[in-house]
């Protein structure tokens, strides 16, 4: 639906020059931009308990307020100087979810969610930096954006315990964005966007786990799998008098045990796929009641149905070698499939919509149809036609 | 107080031949053995909410019952066929804690706790195996012990969800233990002890973390220290169409990030010391009220006081090189000290009692006295004279 124009750049040039390196304005990145939702629809989402929303307001210079949703009433915030931010809108709003698709030259697992913000005139979250890449798409209205390069001399300031802003920064981009303009901002680049009038913006955010997240995830995975692994052993130990000391050889073995986990490539792949495919925010999955039988599904697929993938569903796969089994990861679930299923796995993970042709191809094979039936019964794919 | 007799063996021979290799009966290991506590005292501990106790009873052949404490009344269990087991008795009973001391040719961090059990005639926990080394000291009464070698063909049986027993095993030790006899049993060796008459036994247990424990501990440590570490980065990424795939180079970097943590030797030492010095069971620490001032402590030390270390307090240290700072770990707490403090660190970690001479030596130095004051104020050392 949305088509990305990188100006003079090819996707390869964008990746080589800017991705994770420096911010850039993609002027008119989406030509003739039409907002996928209205401020009213956004407010409708912010009413929901299970949708994460917050309002950031500047009450006076240097004084900030942060409220978390749900929100029923915006009158306390007045006519200007505040922003409503709603997280994971792609989970709830299929049209808005379309905004992510043009960025899928970057792998699924790296893409996080779509955050949508509505700002009143003068509204913004203040100068700050994030740990993640983001494409910020300007929707209706205009916004004055300033973006700088990473700068170790910037100091964090916390005008509110949950707002991490930074001291004033030198900008390399200073622009008034208009509908369809896109700002790409790498991790660590300070940025500040102040709404000129009432405006919408859409942030396609990325996911880049930190060392601690990876380790915690691996520990949780081992616990979940009820895998203890081997224990510390010391059959070679000598009696000693320096009994308080943790010796270097004690530590060596502790390290070897940890290395044994981290160097287990099969474990690593299984863990990472399961971990990274898990959505951070709630999904809008509704299981069909009663569940479908495979035969029913085959009938619908043959008849010319079209299926859509649930918004925000995270799907990726790993295959060690081209003859090896494939592990397909869907929202933390792992499904092991033979190497021959690669085309099907790629179809599921690359297409957010399965058209008639794809559906008929799936219907022609009992295994494919069987797996799709399970996924439909989980509420992960659903009929749109 | 208790002196260990290894028979013909030196400690070095015991370690070389048996430790973590095969079970052995140390006949008369403690000569003229006198129980450090009575069954009544044990029952007194089992009344306490904060002390972990359980009763295992064989109600009929193959039928087992497990109840967790505290216990007020033993009449429901009858006159025979049951055992009361109390964990971490060394935390609560200084005389019983003495039973651990003769085994301190093995480093502090490897020693876990003292479990004490009281069995009625015919009582026992059934044939089972443990993941840890144990020295089982026979107290009053007699017990019929059978011990076998590790055997992969043994099947786990669960006569009760929390009792993990094994199928019948071939024994290499079959003995009636008498007061002062000690059985050493390495991890994985099946064993079964059936009380001949009313008897007490004392298990000095060891600690050997599994891979999962080590990883979980490291993850918790990073969270506690609020260390996120570096994040996944991919500035070299090319645009791609196979967007579902977690590529080998994606995984390579995940692995490198994890290896970066595990190969950080300073982090590893700090983490492991903090982790392994943390007692699994509650300590009986009571902070003196009001806290002592250093000057007061120095006065008492000079006057000829004797101090005892809190039972079950775990203390160990690590020093990378002999000129480097020492990290002293006490029940999860880390204290960094200059290399010159080694003698003091060794004194604290090797002696469960600080005699007059030691106390006067500590009093002579403001830094030593200052640290000891803090430790006394935590309830970790206390005056006995
Ligand atoms: O939409 C906003 O007000 C803030 C957007 C932003 O800073 C981001 O997406 O990183
Ligand atoms: O004391 C008991 O009844 C059981 C002791 C035991 O099996 C052990 O300490 O491993
Ligand atoms: Co931002
Ligand atoms: Co045992």
Image: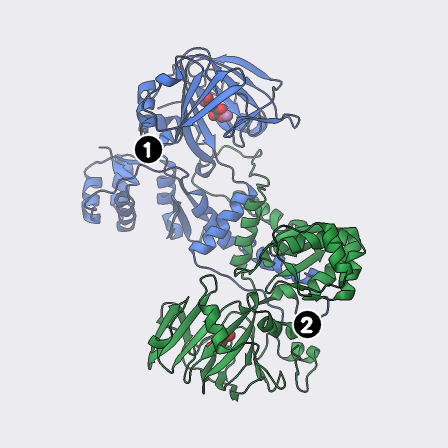
Chain colours: A green, B blue
Name the image quarter holding the C terminus of chain B.
Answer: top left
Quick check: A127 above or below A290? below
Q: Which mark is residue A264?
A: none
* Chain hosting mark 2: A
> Would you call the spot at circle 2 few (<14 residues within 10 Å), some (14-19), or many (20 or more)?
some
Q: Nearer the viewer, residue A20 or A335?
A: A335
Residue that badge 2 annotates:
A105
Q: Is mark 2 within 8 Å of ligand 1?
A: no
Q: For numbered disc 1, what is the local secondary structure?
A: loop
Q: Quadrant of residue B313?
A: top left
Q: Is residue A343 visible?
A: no
On the same chain: label 2 and label 1?
no
Q: Is residue B95 visible?
A: yes
Instruction: Look at 78% across and 53% down and name the residue there.
Output: A339
Give x and y (percent) for residue B123: 45, 16
Give x and y (percent) for residue A254: 54, 45
Name the image quarter holding the N terminus of chain B.
Answer: top left
Instruction: Look at 49% across and 15% down and name the residue there.
Output: B194
Q: Nearer the viewer, residue B153 or B225?
A: B153
Viewed as shown, does residue B196 lie left or right of A159?
right
Q: Is mark 1 within 8 Å of ligand 2?
A: no
Q: CA distance from mark 2 to mark 1?
A: 60 Å
* Chain hosting mark 1: B
Quick check: B98 above or below B250? above
Give x and y (percent) for residue B268: 50, 51
Give x and y (percent) for residue B122: 46, 13
Residue that badge 1 annotates:
B49
Q: For numbered disc 2, what is the local secondary structure?
A: loop
Q: Nearer the viewer, residue A152 or A69?
A: A69
> Would you call the spot at circle 1 few (<14 residues within 10 Å), some (14-19), or many (20 or more)?
few
Quick check: A121 above or below A350? below
């Amino acid at each position: 639906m949305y088509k990305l124009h990188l100006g003079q750049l090819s996707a390869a040039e964008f990746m080589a020059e800017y991705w994770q390196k420096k911010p850039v304005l993609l002027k008119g990145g989406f030509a003739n931009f039409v907002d996928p939702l209205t401020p009213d629809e956004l407010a409708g989402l912010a009413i929901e308990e299970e949708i994460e929303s917050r309002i950031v307001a500047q009450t006076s210079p240097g004084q900030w307020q942060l409220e978390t949703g749900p929100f029923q009433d915006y009158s306390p915030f007045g006519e200007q100087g505040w922003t409503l931010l709603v997280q994971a809108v792609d989970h709830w709003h299929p049209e808005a979810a379309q905004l992510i698709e043009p960025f899928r030259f970057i792998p699924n697992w790296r893409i996080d969610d779509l955050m949508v913000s509505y700002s009143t005139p003068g509204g913004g979250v203040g100068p700050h930096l994030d740990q993640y890449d983001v494409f910020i798409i300007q929707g209706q209205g205009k916004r004055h954006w300033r973006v700088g390069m990473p700068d170790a001399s910037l100091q964090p300031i916390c005008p509110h315990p949950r707002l991490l802003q930074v001291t004033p920064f030198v900008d390399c981009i200073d622009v008034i964005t208009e509908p369809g303009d896109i700002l790409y901002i790498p991790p660590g680049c300070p940025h500040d966007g102040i709404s000129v009038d009432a405006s919408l913006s859409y942030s396609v955010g990325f996911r880049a786990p930190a060392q601690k997240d990876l380790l915690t995830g691996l520990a949780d995975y081992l616990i979940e799998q009820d895998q203890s692994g081997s224990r510390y052993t010391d059959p070679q130990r000598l009696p000693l008098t320096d009994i308080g000391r943790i010796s270097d050889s004690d530590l060596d073995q502790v390290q070897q045990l940890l290395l044994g986990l981290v160097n287990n490539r099969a474990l690593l792949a299984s863990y990472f796929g399961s971990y990274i495919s898990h959505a951070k925010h709630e999904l809008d999955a509704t299981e069909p009641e009663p569940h479908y039988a495979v035969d029913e599904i085959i009938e619908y697929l043959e008849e010319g149905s079209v299926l859509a993938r649930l918004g925000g569903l995270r799907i990726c796969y790993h295959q060690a070698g081209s003859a090896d089994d494939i592990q397909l990861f869907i929202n933390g679930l792992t499904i092991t499939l033979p190497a021959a299923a690669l085309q099907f796995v790629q179809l599921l993970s690359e297409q957010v919509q399965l058209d008639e042709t794809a559906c008929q191809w799936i219907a022609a094979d009992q295994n494919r149809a069987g797996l799709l039936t399970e996924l439909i019964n989980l509420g992960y794919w659903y009929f749109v036609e």
